Amino acid sequence: MIDIRLIRETPERVEAGARKKRIALDLGPLRELDARKTALQQELDRIRSEQNAAAKSIGKAPPEERAKLAEGQKAAKLQLKEKEEAFGKLETELRALLLRVPNLPAAEVPEGKDDSENVEVKKWGEPRRFEFEPRDHIALGEAQDWIDVERGARIAGSRNYFLKGDLSLLEGAVMRFALESMCQKGFVPLSVPTLVRSEVMIGTGYFPGGEEQAYRCDERDDLVLVGTAEVPVTALHQDEILKCTDLPRLYVASSSCYRREAGTYGKDTRGLYRVHQFQKVEQVVIDIADPAKSLEHHHMIVRNAEEVLQALELPYRIVNVCGGDLGAPQIQKFDIETWMPSRKSYGETHSASRFHDYQARRLNMRYRDEAGKVHFCHTLNNTVAASVRMLIALIENHQCADGTVRLPAPLRPYMGGRDSIGKPLG
RNA sequence: GGAGAGGUGGCUGAGUGGCCGAUAGCGCCGGCUUGCUAAGCCGGUGUACUGGUUUUUCCGGUACCGAGGGUUCGAAUCCCUCCCUCUCCGCCA
């Protein structure tokens, strides 16, 4: 949610921002509603003020006169009730509109209509040239008895899977390595709820708009399965006023993530690239409302992810996501794409977003500055490692001619000291 | 799932219809005092919207005592619904 003052004072900026994101936005109805709301509130305040004064004087009057005085207040009371109802309605409508106003993209966000126009800003490592015919992760995974897609689909539907044996262990190793590397940098590890109230989905900016992508419990419970630990972690301090001396807050959380992937039928159907459930280690930063600092944090969380990829010897590139591919909540987003031999291209494995106060405003998450003034926080987040896609990259990039997979050094301690997994295939 | 207790300001905790935006203590901030340390004294200390003053300051209005509704001229206080916490029982991991 953006500050409504921006809409009042510089609506053209807000509209230009939406255009850059290719999001249709007409501020007319919103501004009209806002003006009516303010006028009605002032009127309400005036009426209430009169009522309060009257009630007070009745209280001071001798008891035998009260009934008579109270008689005169009844009409005003009805009028007030009517106006309060109208006001409540206005407020609800206004908030609904305001929730859909996209955040303003940064100047550094490139113009563009979709992901094809994202701008590459960095490339690390060289995609490996195989001196043999490399297997894709499914062929390799099934040959090694590491992946069972068929039974996954049977018990949970398409885009579900079992990991078995060393690949299941490898998943744990990657998560653990990612988590520990973040802890070393001072991030506080969290175990989090993955079923959250829909209010929290609104607070983090996923709703309204993303309902189709989330699994929701039935009407008995107003709970939604999160698509990322970003949601519970960012909402951790909802409705709080933090001390600026306690900022920045650096959090890292490992969690299961659930995505409906509605509207992706036929896309990435082979393999485990696009699945309904996976494990992910996520980093979240909460800090004061300083754009320069936010930008610094943004670069920092990208670097954190890069260090993990470099340690795992995986070639990647970073793209500056263009306006049309940017979500409504973000100021700017950098995606990290890791080389995946089977795709013969880089596939998205990380997504680093900067929000300024967009999420904090919705979550009512604030802090008090040195002068005692209260402001909304700034928030950011990025993947550290997301399980299946990282596993795809790991086993495809580090496979050997005989079907075994070499383990990069940092994972070995978590794999019983072994330097490779898998049996030689015939 | 059944029975009961409760949710008040950063914290503890008063307040059972008007004098309560809310006693008190702690904490915090400012000032004073004391030769150090500790303590003491005085003052201040919520958030949002809003009017005037028109950056700051200052003065005023409205709302908020878990959330939403209701009763009443008037609700932190009474009633209803929901959420949450705690205790006991049951069930389950």
Image (cartoon, coloured by chain):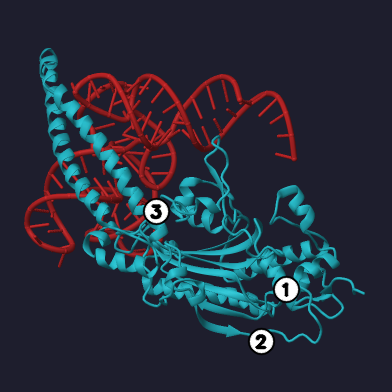
A68 shown above or below A23: above
What kind of residue is marked 1?
Leu
Q: Is residue A169 left or right of residue A85?
A: right
Q: CA distance from mark 2 to mark 3?
A: 42 Å
Percent x, y for residue A116? 51, 75
Number of labelled discs? 3
Nearer mark to the viewer, of 3 and 1: 1
**Residue A201, disc:** none
Quarter placement of the N terminus of chain A: bottom left
**Residue A126, disc:** 2
What kind of residue is marked 3?
Arg
Q: Which one is in front, A266 or A417?
A: A266
Q: Chain of mark 3?
A: A
Please tell me which of labels 2 and 1 falls first in the chain.
2
Chain in cyan colour: A
Secondary structure at numbered mark 1: helix
Q: Which one is in front, A50 or B38?
A: A50
Circle 3 residue: A362
Q: Chain of mark 2?
A: A
Percent x, y for residue A99? 37, 53
Please tell me which of labels 2 and 3 falls first in the chain.
2
Circle 1 residue: A394
Q: Chain of mark 1?
A: A
What kind of residue is marked 2?
Glu
Q: Does residue A185 appear in this view? A: yes
